Amino acid sequence: MTCCGIDIHAHVVPGHFPAWLDRQIPQGWPAMVEAPARAGHCHRHVMIDGKNYRTVTDHCWNVARRLADLPEMGIATQVISPMPELLSYWLPAGTAQPLVRFLNETIAAMVAESNGVLQGFGAVPLQDMNLALAELDYLHSHLHLSGVEIGSHINGIPLGDMRLRPFFEACAERDIPVFVHALKPTGMDRLVGPAQLQQVLAYPSDVGLAATSVITGNLLESLPALRLAFSHGGGTFASLLPRLQQGWLVFPDLQESIQTAPVTQARQLYFDTLVFDPHTLQHLIQQFGASQLMLGTDYPFNFREKHPAQQVLACQLNDADRDALLSGNAARFLGFASQQTRIST
């Protein structure tokens, strides 16, 4: 398979975190601890407050190992972003800022080492708008990262809330794309089973609510140039949208508060293809348009799409739509120049 896909959804965990220099380590500050190697790969535990948050392999920080895995996936370019838990909105802003700066500089160094095969989404401490805007300027103007990753809410503040509007205004003004990833999702108290259900079931619910808040908050109505993409295929959003559209038609209050039809606004948003099922992917294409879907893998975590290009090919799209999903849409979202998008098998 010729490699030409652009993976918009892949993550980084640094091989180490900077030591906190004061005597008392702040609550929530991450650390890496060596774990037994398996299958020839280095493993480390991501420790937060003395607990193992996740055990990861060196694919999270080793550029050479990462690049070696891309051809089998049909990926020519991979956009890397922080593991969402590292966005750290819950830390005091003065504590989060140096951690976020370290993440952004780590990602920039990995991009440079890859000779352009990797591109980077940085992070900003959105719990403090002034610090967030300053870091946005740094990652864009100094580090030249391709965009920014944010959570599906900011300590409970939905993305459509006016309190976050200065951040989105800055992104639109500077032509910086925004990738929204599920984070600390709502509804965990309604699930019965192991902690992994957070990723499996609660993440899609939170992403769906995040995308809905963008529409009900009229974010794109005020900032039509803003480019927003949602992880995990937008989660539950594709199922929520018909209800929101019908409600908009039925209830005068919704027509008054939502300026443009929800289905029209939804087709301005982007979504990754990380749904693990070609039939579900075909539904997303019908719902949002073939122009709005981009490859996503969640690499290098275990719960990922290992053959993203094959999922697109299984949808049996025409050549133009197939090439758009494989790389053309992502190139447009990222602001890349026109590039070769055809894939052959």
Image (cartoon, rainbow, N blue to C red):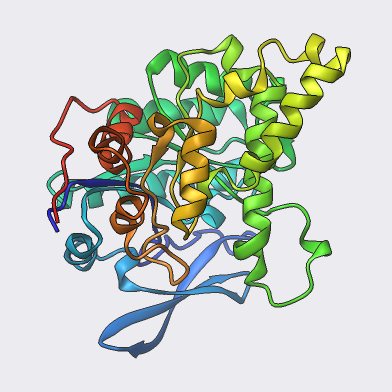
73 displayed left or right of 23: left
Picture residue at 62% right of the left edge, 34% below the top:
211
116 displayed left or right of 176: left
For residue 66, say whether it is visible. yes
Choose top left, top right, bottom left or bottom right for residue 142: top left
Residue 27 point in image, percent of width and height: 66, 61
Residue 286 point in image, percent of width and height: 50, 36
Viewer-closest of 18 and 116: 116
205 displayed left or right of 275: right
Screen quadrant of the N terminus: bottom left
Choose top left, top right, bottom left or bottom right for residue 250: top right
In the displayed structure, would residue 314 be above or below residue 221?
Answer: below
Viewer-closest of 284 and 144: 284
Residue 316 point in image, percent of width and height: 32, 48
Picture residue at 83% right of the left edge, 63% below the top:
189
Choose top left, top right, bottom left or bottom right for residue 25: bottom right
Residue 6 point in image, percent of width and height: 27, 45
Screen quadrant of the C terminus: bottom left
321 displayed left or right of 134: left
In the displayed structure, would residue 177 be above or below residue 38?
Answer: above
Count of numbered circles in the view: 0
For residue 231, say whether it is visible. no
Viewer-closest of 31 and 80: 80
Picture residue at 69% right of the left edge, 53% below the top:
185
Picture residue at 34% right of the left edge, 89% below the top:
38
